[in-house]
Image (spheres, rainbow, N blue to C red):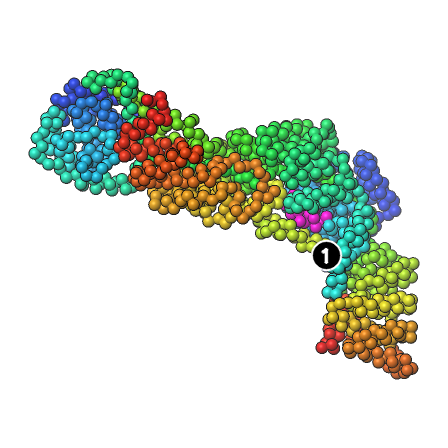
Amino acid sequence: MADLENYDMVSENSSQASEHEKALALSAQLDFEKTNYESAIQLLSKLECSRPQDPKVIHNKAIVNCFKAGLTNICQLRKALTSIAKQLQCNLEEPKTLVDVDQCYVFYNEAVTLYCLRQYPKSLQILTKIFSLVEQLDESLARQVCFLLAEVFLRLNFPVKTLDMVHFMETSLLSHGAKLKSTLPLERERDKEKDCEGKEELKSSFGDELLIPPGVRIRLQRLKIRANLSLSQIEEAERELALLTEIDPENAATLCLKSKTLFFKGTYAESLKQLKLPKDDGRFKERGESDVVMYHNNTGCIYHAMGKYHLACLHFQKSLNKSNELFAEFPKPSTGDPISNRPLVTIGSNYKYELLYNMGVSLLYARKPADAFDCLIEAVQLHHRDPLVWLRLAECCIQVHKPENRKDFRLTERQREIVKATAGFASHRKVVLSSRISNDDCKSSENAAIPVPTLEFSILALRNAELLLNKLIIPKGAEDASGKEESDSKGKPDLNVTLSEVSTLSKLRKPEFYRNLKNTIIADSSYASLCLGDYLTSLYKAEELLTQPHLSGNHKLLGHLYAAESLVLLNRINEAVPHLHPENVTKLSNFSSTENENSQFLPHTSDWFPLSTQTAKVLLQYNLSTVYALRGEYEKAGELVRQLWNASKTHGIDVPIQVVTLALYVELQLGRTEVARNIIKQHCPQYR
Amino acid sequence: MSALSVKDLNQLLTILDAENVANQSVEALASQLGVFNKQEYFKVGNALVMLLQNADLLPSPSQRLAAVLLLHELFKPDAQNFHPFSSVFVQLLADESSAKRPESYRLPKLSPPEKIYLSHLITNPQKDMYKKTLRQILNLETTNSMADISALQTSLSERLSDYTSASKSRIPAILSMPDVRQGFDPALPDSSAIKKTAEALVMGPNAAIQESVGPEFVRLAPPLFCPDELVWIDPIGEADHTIAYDTTVCIPRGAGSEARRLISQAFTGSLTLLQQNRLLSELERDSRLVYHVGITPNKLPALVENNPLIAIEVLLRLMQSSQITEYLSVLVNMEMSLHSMEVVNRLTTAVELPTEFVHLYISNCISTCETIKDRYMQNRLVRLVCVFLQSLIRNKIINVQELFIEVQAFCIGFSRIREAAALFRLLKQLDSGDQSGLNTTSSIASFPGLSSLSAPSFNSQASPVASAAKGKGE
């Protein structure tokens, strides 16, 4: 009942308005709409004199003031909103206190500022509450609330909810004539029959669509395309795109969405063709969006997908430069208020950290891990809740540590490294053999908390990634993400969502993505621990990796290799042998056999070595011969190494340089020094 | 750990100088270790082992023996009777005929007298043993047998068991590769060449002497996580989401808006009793309000389905409206349901409806009943229609004669249903002029099936009708 009394009080306030006051209010509104802010403020001040208790007047005055300042004094506005809310007996911090339609404007404006500050969950909370009163809102506010809700849902990775909102707007908010479904089963059946006829229904709804103003129609179409792409529903996106192209063919936004749709289809060349460098990028202050930044970034994305990483980096750099240039034009924010002095609309649209992420990943693929690390370490400042960013950082560290696997297999290049140095001459000549021809071990030195691309830091990054991934709410199946529970056309969409603490940078992912991400994190953890001499952890991680369902061929191979090596280094040699069975190699791939390599996976990253199962088998066998040597079974080890060597000669199979060094070692252990010398002479002719 | 300094190495090589080492007593030899700093002893020991492993660097047998003895004298056995270089001694003393010790390949082979002397020195050192010169040791009569060193072997293998195979497997990285193309004269050991070679092996931060080789695993770095696409920037139209100006300022929010709100809610779901009463009282207060609450003919079916009572009130208030015909035609053409029937029934009793409207509705009902495929639903609907028709007839809302043929055909068609038979009997009665069956009151409450219609809260669920009908059928 308290609510009702409150309601009476508020309504009383406005019901007392005289005709003169009404006229004042109307002309103030007209002046505001014509952007005559000065005169609007004067009129509102007059109105305030006669209606000092009316919170709406104070509210509008604050709004006009804010517009007059070019929407740059957001702090001030929020303070004003907070005090108006107090007057309206509600609290902006607690959306629960929103009970009356008169409080909606204050809450909506708070939600807008929160949206611009990228505080989407808070914004969503408020909007959901306002939406519960949507029938009572005036049409323009209701529309704005619905659009903002749809956008916020998309930002929070709930594209299905975005589609629900769009559907709601199309059927309930913008069209007239409620379609009702009867409660009788009989009638429902009839409805179904109608649906089968289909096309007539479509026509009738198209009639409604005609009532929707084109501007609104365009916004709805854009939302539908983006949401469908986010759901990887390419066909639906294409259908909506066709409709958008009909209404708004030449717009840069249309072309951008067309390009994105083609990109998702995997037709990169076509996608690239749609994008054109805009000549002018004016009105950034009003629009909050820069076509130039967008063009370079999206072009970079396409080049990256095409495997042209350097070109991609170039575009990301240009995009970043332009973005920095645009933001440098604003005066420095005053102290204590980091968002001051720049228009509200530009605050949330600063893509610096996303651009840095893109560039970092491209640099990583371009094999510039140290530069990539510098980009990503900045990106992670904003996206510290995204497991993917942490994984990328760890990958940079690993690539800095070991740039490639192929190195050991370049025999001609590496064989002269078998001998590290010589000493003495003539009869006293000594050769010093390389103690570790490919040293993957890393001496622990730096403090892990210092962000430098070291393996210690990678351990920390991987731990973050794993924790975040475990917290992430992962869609259980594809139907969960795409299956629309068709709410009745009469009903309002259900806005309940479970917000994850963890954010992700881009679109909604399939469950395979998360599985693969998890496996990659585990494999990387095992590798880094192994290199750092933490053999128990590396063993534990390798075993964990091997128990994962849907393991890719690559991860299976790595799991066995890391487990075997960890066991050996833990002096549990005999347990290592089963891991090195050649049958542990299946088809080498980044994907598990159950996953088809669908469009979600870009075809660009099969440059991992080894590529062939044959090479992988050689590796397992080589490591097995190492185990034999460690057990003192030198004859057995020597035999296996000889087989591998012969196989490489006769069948041209790649073998690592370690095959030679192990052969040398075995001969020395067997006391066959002369054979050992011959091996050296064979590979390093300068020691003849 | 850096290797031995050049100065120390030179001193060591001087001590081991072939010219004078042979005639020294063991005691005198050991005393020369005093030139080294105690902390360097381990490094000296390493250097000695390296020299021993490279036979060409210690050409004479006495030098070799001197190196072995110096190595032994470097460390006095500690409490556990353990010498850091025990493994060297064990290897030197190993019986070559027995188990092959491959690692020993580089250590020199000691002669039997040397072995005997060394074994006794290790196990049970006597003062007089130190008085012997190296030459004497080399020429000892082999009458004594070797001392038993199994205790040393046991303690060594115990110690070694603490190490992993990986660390035990490592062997020195230095390998002799005599350059055969250059002149090689074993008769003339070039002491300065030896010195240079030894220096080269010992010096520097990564001295060769400290290096070792062993079996190495090939360790693959994991592949990059690949199913990734970067962040696209979408055209959002950020400027569309902006601060809003309150346009409702000074616009009174009286009863009208409340009624509007309730009506709009009534389109989507049934109102609570409280809300219904509130809405009805609002409508009561202002007779013109009904035209401004957002009701259109199109929306009527939604209202009928969700809130039939409100629908009736609204329709009654709209009777004077110019649009009433449209409302009514929507009503008769809407899908036949319990609620629509209730609404029509209530309307017929409250106001005089155009006859063609009622007839149209009845035809609609009958044809719905006839076309429905679901047998159960059909029975249910037929029962409802029969009860409804009886009510209309008894209340004299319709003149049966105008619909006689149609209704009669309906009754015959569904004669298997009890209500249809009853209706048929009523028709026959009327046809024969017998008016006694007709109620003179206009209340429909007397009909068991429709009694619920007049109940104030019938919107809550009108299922009593259905259940009554159902009950009868079974």
* x 49%, y 43%: residue: A587
Q: Amino acid at mark 1?
A: Asp
Q: Position of residue A44 (x, y in %)?
A: 81, 40
* Furthest-front residue in this view: A650
B13 sits to left or right of A464: left
Residue nearest the observer in this picture, B14 or A464: B14
Residue A447 is a magenta residue: no
Quarter of the N terminus of chain B within the rendering: top left
Q: Is B35 on the left or on the right of A298, as rendered? A: left
Task: Tell me residue B170's x, y (percent).
Answer: 31, 34
Q: Which residues are magenta?
A: A148-166
Identify the residue at horizontal 57%, vertical 41% (top origin): B227
The answer to which image quadrant residue B5 occupies is top left
Left or right: A524 as drawn, with respect to B349: left
Q: Is residue A577 visible?
A: yes
Graded by Cα atoms within 10 Å as few (under 14), some (14 to 19) or many (20 or more), the crowding at tag 1 reads few
Say which quarter of the image contains residue A381.
top right
Which residue occupies 33% across, 40% down? Answer: A628
For disc 1, the marked residue is A488
Measuring from the top left, give residue A594's x and y in whole percent.
Answer: 54, 48
Residue nearest the observer in this picture, B393 or B258: B393
- Of the 4 image quadrants, the one containing the C terminus of chain B is bottom right
Q: Which secondary structure dominates the residues rendered in magenta?
A: helix
Look at 68% across and 54% down and name the residue there: A494
Q: Quadrant of residue A631?
A: top left
Q: Chain letter of disc 1?
A: A
Whole-percent x and y of residue A626? Answer: 35, 38
Q: How many marks?
A: 1
Please tell me whether residue A538 is drawn above or below residue B140 in the rendered image. Answer: below
